[in-house]
Image (tube, rainbow, N blue to C red):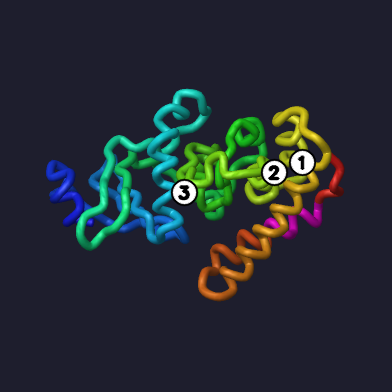
Amino acid sequence: MRRLLGAQHPDLADLPLRMVAEGWDNAIYRVGEHLAARLPRRALAAALILGEQRWLGQLQAQLPLPIPAAVRIGTQQQEYPWHWSITPWLAGETADLAPPDAAQEQVLAQLLSDLHPRNALVADGRLCAVIDWGDLAGGDRATDLAAIWMLLPDAASRKAAIVAYGAAPAGTWRRARGWAALFAVILLDAGLADDARMAAIGRRTVNRISADDGRT
């Protein structure tokens, strides 16, 4: 990471540097106090980050929360084969460690992205940022609406989020619940292997789906 900074953004190369997260798609470094570096870990994610670089700068003014729009672009060089981004550092704790308050359903209904709880940041009970937009416009909106069961802690807040989102066919909401169940199983499977936090997200999601009566 420091070699990449030195070659492409030398004014940042001497700032304190610390890896803070390593997900399925990206590794995240904190660069100094105010910046983050976001580097794809696999070829699939390398394609996704190009979409983030193209669209997030245009979307940020239209959304209710900060998003990691790139302030600088990195390119491939020698030992690193893909494009990468430098973004603002967005403070907060991930929602699996700091669940949002029930009143956050109005904010959640305005956001469409890969909104599992480790991609949403929370401060003082309020959603304060969404940090992964690689799957932006990637397919069925029901996959995004699955976040209602992955993020909101009680049945009343989930119902309010569905109402706040507005009109959608009943089939969309059935698919959303189905996607939430699928994501829960995937997270449980991955989590039981080597990541207790992912397993906990999966268990909570399954419990929330089971607790709701299925009417929208």
Q: Are marks 1 and 2 in contact (CB under 8 Å)?
A: yes
Mark 1 or 3: the one toward you? 1
How far apart are the alpha carbons under marks 2 and 3? 26 Å
Mark 2: give few (<14), some (14-19) or many (20+) Cα within 10 Å: many
Residue position for label 1: 172
Instruction: Measure the C-alpha gap from mark 1 to mark 3.
Output: 30 Å
Residue type indicated by callout 1: Thr
Dominant SS in magenta: helix
Q: Do the numbered discs 2 and 3 sit on residues whose CB atoms are within 8 Å?
A: no
Secondary element type, mark 1: helix
Give the amino acid at mark 2.
Answer: Ala
Of mark 1 and mark 2, the one earlier in the sequence is 2
**Residue at screen point 66% across, 35% down:** 105
Q: For the point 51% across and 28% down, which residue is it? A: 63
Badge number at residue 142: 2
What residue did someone put label 3 on? Answer: 93
Per the image, label 3 sits on a secondary structure element best described as strand
Toward the viewer: 130 or 78?
A: 78
Percent position (x, y) of residue 91?
A: 40, 42
Amino acid type at image mark 3: Glu
Q: Are marks 1 and 3 in contact (CB under 8 Å)?
A: no
Which residue is nearer to you in this view: 134 or 2? 134
Residue 171 part of the magenta-drawn span: no
Task: Tell whether 140 sits left or right of 111.
Answer: right
Q: Where does the magenta region start and end?
A: 204-211
Q: Looking at this rendering, what residue extends furthest in the top direction?
A: 61
Query: Which of the two discs, 2 and 3, sits closer to the camera?
Result: 2
